[in-house]
Image: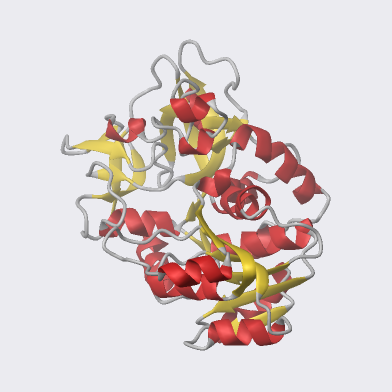
């Protein structure tokens, strides 16, 4: 028996309860979680914006220590520190074949598997493959990456989603060049990672936009040179800060039509907008044909930061160890499992950075 946060049905409150977790079978790894980040994607799973089989154990951003491995697992051993990878690539589909592992067709195939059972025998699925909102979890071996040396596991938990996504949005999707200007919409966990990545990329001006005035100090600590309170006039304010032109790059971390549109309008003619935020399928963003031609801007989606975790984790670890990327500053609250519902409420209200469940 281990304690876990279970989503019994879409739209239902999370239940903190005991679950029965099996021992690892062939190709599986059992892990004692050190920490798990509370990500907006977990909220999207709970409210049905993203669909996976339920009931499920949520949580997809985590790190911990290997307790046991099943037959055939050789890249990690009991006692090793590991980071969980919620979107493992299969290596065989079309996208994996052309190097776009973040678009792997089978990345979420494991969500339909049986993960554990409740005390009364109800079958549970792993929300996004790794079921990190639990004291322990059992995952497929390809969902496990060796934790970088010299980084505490509680900090390393953030590498599993927020940091890879934010870093990749800047370096792989928007491909920010030294001297360019960047505006970031939404200063939660991912937004804070985007700000730090923009600073590492050498952006000359980094503008943070959020609905909350309380986040300004945190944004500036992450690398923002300017802070704008979100409003209907935000694009105009961004252009005013950039000599009337707009920024070279905008990164949207909210997932709302109005924010996506504002991010696009905040870039200069020929600018680039990367959308990281996840919105609902019934939410539409509209453009007219003439403005698309006239402005010459680009608008792109971004899945998991267009990252390859096996490639990008070592690069990120170098930045962290050198002090260029600060993981601890992204965490504004340390909580227990029973604090996750309140962390969801804070995300809805736009409060704080990353809440971290510490075991």
Residue 309 on image: x %, y %? 60, 37
Q: Residue at x 49, y 72 (%)?
A: 291
In the image, 296 versus 93, the foreground residue is: 296
Is 274 placed above or below 55 here? Answer: below
Q: Position of residue 179 (x, y in %)?
A: 81, 65
Q: Nearer the viewer, residue 1 or 252?
A: 252
Where is 25 relative to 34, above or below?
A: above
**Which one is in front, 238 or 165?**
238
Return the x and y of residue 316 as percentages of the image width and height: 71, 45
Q: Is residue 325 left or right of residue 303?
A: right
Q: Is residue 230 above or below residue 93?
A: below
Q: Quadrant of residue 213?
A: bottom right
Residue 114 appears left or right of 301 = left
Viewer-proximal residue, 11 or 301?
301
Q: Residue at x 63, y 46 (%)?
A: 156
Would you say residue 130 is visible in this rendering?
yes
Image spot of residue 19 (x, y percent): 29, 39
Residue 2 quadrant: top left
> Which quadrant: the N terminus?
top left
Marker count (numbered):
0
């Amino acid at each position: 028996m281990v304690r876990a946060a279970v989503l019994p049905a879409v739209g239902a409150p999370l239940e903190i309860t005991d679950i029965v977790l099996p021992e690892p079978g062939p190709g599986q790894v059992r892990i004692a979680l050190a920490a798990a980040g509370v990500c907006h994607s977990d909220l999207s799973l709970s409210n049905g914006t993203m669909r996976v089989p339920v009931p499920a154990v949520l949580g997809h951003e985590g790190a911990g220590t290997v307790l046991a491995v099943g037959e055939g697992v050789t890249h990690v051993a009991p006692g090793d520190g590991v980071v969980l990878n919620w979107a493992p690539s299969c290596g065989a589909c079309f996208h994996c074949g052309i190097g776009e592992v973040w678009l792997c067709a089978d990345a979420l195939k494991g969500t339909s598997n049986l993960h554990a059972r409740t005390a009364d025998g109800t079958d549970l699925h792993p929300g996004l493959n790794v079921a990190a909102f639990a004291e322990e979890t059992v995952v497929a071996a390809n969902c496990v990456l060796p934790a970088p040396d010299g980084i505490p596991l509680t900090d390393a938990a953030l590498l599993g989603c927020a940091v890879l996504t934010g870093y990749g949005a800047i370096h792989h999707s928007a491909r920010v060049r030294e001297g360019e200007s960047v505006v970031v919409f939404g200063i939660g966990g991912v937004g804070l990672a985007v700000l730090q990545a923009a600073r590492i990329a050498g952006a000359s001006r980094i503008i943070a936009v959020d609905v909350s005035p309380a986040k300004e100090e945190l944004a500036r600590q992450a690398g923002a040179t300017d802070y704008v309170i979100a409003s209907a006039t935000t694009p105009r304010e961004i252009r005013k800060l950039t000599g009337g032109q707009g920024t070279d790059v905008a990164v949207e971390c909210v997932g709302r039509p109005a924010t996506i549109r504002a991010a696009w309008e905040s870039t200069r003619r020929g600018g680039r907008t990367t959308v990281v935020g996840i919105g609902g399928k019934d939410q539409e963003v509209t453009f007219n044909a003439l403005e698309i031609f006239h402005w010459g801007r680009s608008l792109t989606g971004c899945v998991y930061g267009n990252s390859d975790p096996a490639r990008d984790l070592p690069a990120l670890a170098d930045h962290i160890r050198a002090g260029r990327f600060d993981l601890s500053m992204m965490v504004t609250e340390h909580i227990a499992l029973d604090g996750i519902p309140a962390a969801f409420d804070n995300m809805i209200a736009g409060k704080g950075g990353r809440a971290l469940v510490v075991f």
